[in-house]
Amino acid sequence: MRKTFLFLAGSTLSVAVFAVSSTVASQTAAPAGDAAKGKASYERTGCWQCHGGQGQGGREGPRIASPVPMAWPALSRFVRTTKGDMPPYTEKVLSNQELADVYAYLRSIPPAPDFRTLPLLNGMMTPAAQR
Amino acid sequence: MTRKNARTEVSRRKFLAGVAMTGAATAVSVSGEVQAAAVKAGRPATTRPSTAAAQAELATRSVQAAPGTLPGRPGSDFMVDVLKSLELDFVFSNPASSCRGIHESIVTYGGNKRPEFITCLHEESAVAMTHGYYKVAGKPAAALCHGTVGLQHAAMAVYNAWCDRAASIVMVGNRMDAATRQPGVPTIHAVQDPGSLIRDFTKWDDNPQSLQHFAESMVRAYKITMTPPLEPVLMVLEEKLQEDAIDSGGRPLVIPKLSRVAPPAGDPNAVREAARLLATADNPVIVVDRVGRTPAGVKHLVELAEALNAPVVDQLGRMNMPNDHYLYQLGGGRVIEQADVILGLELTDFWGTVNNSDDSVEMTQVYRPKAGARLISIGMGDLYIRANYQDFERYQPVDIAIGADAETTLPVLTEYIKQAIPADRRAKIAERGDKARKGQVQARQSMLTQAAANAWDASPISAARLSAEIWQQIKHENWALVSRDSSLSNWPHRLWTFNQHHQFIGGPGGAGIGYGLPAAVGAAFAHREADRRLCVNLQNDGDSMYAPGALWTAAHHKVPMLTVMWNNRAYHQEIMHLQRMANWRQRGIENPHIGTTIWDPYINYAKLAEALGHVGIGPITDPKDLAVAIKRGVDAVKMGEPVLIDVVTQPR
C-alpha cells in the first residue's frame, strides 16, 4: 500500500499559490450559485477529503473558507489549471455551474468564532515557555 | 534418532491438545512409534502434511518416557539467565511450538519476571510493541515468535523498526536437524536460514549452535541493536538447545559482560568547518528528524539552536525539541527558502527536505534553497546502508557530510560555534532571537485566529476541536502521547505543549500500517513501568483493524491507556490517491470511495474495545459530547483501566 506523506510545507505552499493567484485575479463577480447544491457537489467530488467538510483545511489541503481566500476568477482558474498536488478539476468532472455552486457554498460558511470566545482556545495565545 | 534416550519428549501441541488427547496417547512409545507410523504411511518427510498428519500433529504422539529425568537443567533455563543478565523487562510473544522450551523457562524457571512473557495476538504486534517500548524505555525488549510463519507475520513490524532506527531483539525458534524434527507441520515450519527473511532490514542476526555461542551472541545482539544507528537484530533459538539438557562439554558457561559502545562523534575538522559556516551565516536553519535519541539530544539541540538563534524545523521523527520554544518550527514554512546554511540532523530524507516534488502528472520538482545556500548533514545514515529496500531515499549532495551520531556530536558543534562567532555577529544573532520570539507569538495568533476555530462545531468532528478537548483534560496530568498526530493535521503539536522527551515518540518509520495500536501499547508498557504516566493514543481507524488484538494485550496485562479513535471511516490517504487518478484520467470522480472507505457497516470501535477488555465510549459524533466522554475516559485510565473513545471525525 503506497503511503505518501505531504508535509505541512506543501499546504503552506498551496496557500501561497492561492494568495498569489488572488492578487492577479480580476474582481469579476462570480456567477450565481446555489449553496445547497454546492455543498452536495463539494462532497460528491471529494473536495472535503483534503479541505475538510467546512473548508477548514488540514494536512493535505489548505483552508478555503471562512473566508474564501480568493476571488472567483482566481479560484475558477486555479481549479481548472492547477498542476500541483491538487489535480485539476475539468468541466467534465465539475461543470461551471457546479463550480459556481461550490463557490457559493464556501462563501455561505459562516466565519469562525473569535478564538478568544472559546474557553478551550482562549489562553493559548502565549506559548507556554513565554508565560 | 540421535536424541539422548532420557530426553524429555513432549508433543508440540500438548498444551493445546488437552488432557483427553494425552490420555489416548500415553501407551504410545517414544519416537520409534512416530517414525514407524511415517514409514507405514509411505509419507516422505518433506511433503505437506495430510489431514491425518495434521491431526496427528495436534495430538500427543510422544510422551515423556520418564518425566523429570532430563539430566540437568534445560538449555532454555540458561537462555533465560542470559536474558536476565541483560535486564530485559519484557518478551512480547505470540506462543509458538518452536519456542516452547524458552517459553516454559521464562514463565516457570524465570518466575515470569524480568523478563515477563507478554501475550500478543499477532507476531507483527509483538515486534511493534518492542518498537514502541524502546522509544519510551530507551532500551530494547524482545519479541519471540516462530521461525518461519511467525517471522513472516512479524516482518512488516521489523521493517518499521528498521526505518525508525529503533532497537528491538527479535528471537525466533527453529529446529534445523531434520533427523530429530517431527514430520509434517514442524518440518514445514523449519527453515535453513531464518535470518534471510529479514536480513535486508536487520542489522545483525545469528543462529547459535551451542549455549555458550548463544550467550555471546545474545549479548552481542543487545550491544549491536543499541549502537547507533539503532536497528533491530535477530536471534535464532535452536530448539535442541532450548530443550536438551545443558551440556557444555565440561566447560563452565559464561555470560559475557555487556560492553556498551560509545556512539561516534563527528570528525573534529569537519565539525569545526560546519561550525564556521553556521556561525557566520545570516539565516542558518536547523532541520531535525531523529535527534532526540535520548533526553540528552533534546537538551543539546536547544543549546545549539540558542547559540545561533536559528529556527529548528521539526520533522517529528522523535521528540526533538520543546514545541513551545521560540525557535521551534513545525513544518518549516519558508525558512528553507530563506536559509543560507541548512544543517540537517539525522534526517531520513534530506532530498525531500530541500526539494518540493508534487504528486502531479508532471511531477514537478523544485529545489527550494536559494542559490549559494550551503548544506551540512550530520547523521548515521551515511555509515550504515543496505541496497535492496529504498529507505535511504534520494541522494542529496551536501557541502559537508559528517557521518556521526548527531546527539553525540552536538555539544562539540555548539562549543565550536560559540568559539567561531565573530564579535560583530553577536548583536545580529541576538536580533534573530528577538525576531523569532515575536514571530512565534504572531504565528500562534494566526493559527488560532485563522485555523483552530474553523469547523469548531462541525460534525464529523474537526481535528482542532478534538485536540483542544483532549488537551483540556490532560494538560495538568503527567501525560505522554504514544502515537503520532499527523492524521490530526498535527493539531496536538500546534495546541499542546510538548516539553519532555517522553511525551512524543514519532511515527512508524516505514509507514507500514498496523504499527499504531501495538506500538502504542508497547510504549504504554514502558510508561507504566516508568512513572504510571497517562498515555494518550490517537489511533487511526484503518490502522487499528490490522491488529485490534493489541487492545486485548493491554487489557490482559493491565496497561492503562486512553485510545482516542480518529475514526474517519476510511483509508483516507488512499481516497486522495484515487481522486488524483480519477482526475488525471478524467473518467469521473464518483468512485474513489470504492475500496478505500470503511462504510456499510460502520465499525463500532467502542463495542469492539469492550469485547477486548476495554472501557468503550462512543461513537461520539457531536463535539459537544467530547468533554464528558474524554473526562470519563481519563478518569478510568487514572484508575488503571484501558479505555477507547470512538470519535467520528473529519478526514484530516
Image: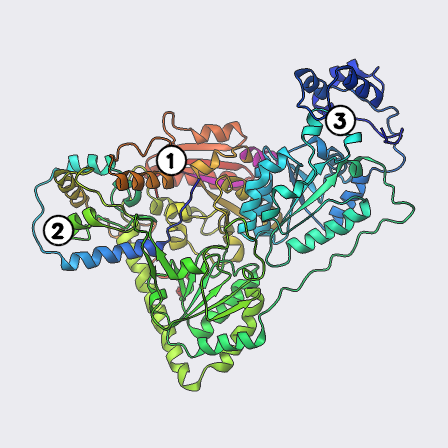
The question of residue B141 being in magenta is answered with: no
Question: Which-is-in-front pick, marks 1 and 2?
Answer: 2
Q: Chain of mark 2?
A: A
The question of residue B556 being in magenta is answered with: yes
Q: Are marks 3 and 2 on the same chain?
A: no
Q: Name the N-terminal-most of marks 3 and 1.
A: 3
The picture places residue B278, in percent across and down from the top left corner, at 45, 75
What residue did someone put label 3 on? B182
Q: Residues within 10 Å of mark 2 (few under 14, many from 20)?
A: some
The picture places residue B342, in percent across and down from the top left corner, at 42, 68
Of residues B231 and A59, the one drawn nearer to the viewer in this rendering: B231
What residue did someone put label 1 on? B570
The picture places residue B585, in percent across and down from the top left corner, at 27, 39
Question: Which-is-in-front pick, marks 3 and 1?
Answer: 3
The picture places residue B210, in percent across and down from the top left corner, at 81, 44
- Apparent side of residue B487 relative to residue A118 in the rendered image (left or right): right
What residue did someone put label 2 on? A73
The quarter in which the C terminus of chain B is drawn is: top left
For the residues labelled 1 and 2, the Cα–Cα distance comes to: 33 Å
For the residues labelled 3 and 1, the Cα–Cα distance comes to: 45 Å
Q: Quadrant of residue B148?
A: top right
Q: Chain of mark 3?
A: B
Give the magenta-colored segment's residue range: B551-568
Q: Are marks 1 and 2 on the same chain?
A: no
